Amino acid sequence: MAITKVWIEEGCIVCNACETTCPEVFAVTEDTCLIRAEVRTDGVFDANLASQSPLAGSFGRDLADQIQEAAEGCPVEVIKFVKA
Ligand code: SF4
């Protein structure tokens, strides 16, 4: 299984669970969670909600399980992703 892209919908409650599960992808700030620039094709550091940038290189394969686990563990279900 691989994940092609991941983004954060509005409504994050800043619980830090996703960053604990998969710190390579998720970065929790003071008021929301963002997708790290290093794992994105566009190299932008934001929620990836509007841009829907694909994951770069092999991140989508290497981190698929952790991303899915983080999404399932999000208490408000705002982590969304697309599987290949
Ligand atoms: S797990 Fe969900 S609510 Fe918690 S910081 Fe991550 S995106 Fe926000």
Image (cartoon, grey):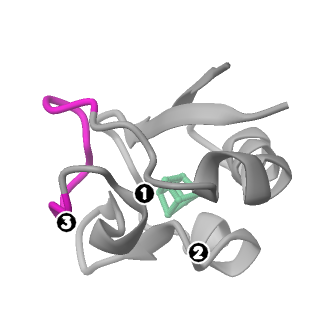
- Image coordinates of residue 79 in percent, x first then y, are 52, 39
- Residue type marked 3: Phe
Q: Is residue 7 magenta?
A: no
The residues colored magenta run 43-52
- Residue type marked 1: Ile
Which numbered disc flags the more N-terminal residue, 3 or 2?
Answer: 2
Give the SS element for disc 3.
Answer: loop
Assess mark 3: CB under 8 A from ligand 1?
no
* Residue 78 can be seen, yes or no: no
Q: Which residue is mark 3?
A: 45
Give the SS element for disc 1.
Answer: loop
- Compared across the picture, whether 26 is left or right of 30 comes to right
Give the SS element for disc 2.
Answer: helix
Q: Which residue is mark 1?
A: 13
Residue at point 85%, 31% (across, down): 1
Q: Which residue is mark 2?
A: 19
Residue at point 24%, 33% (across, down): 49
**Magenta-drawn stretch, dominant element (helix, strand or loop):** loop
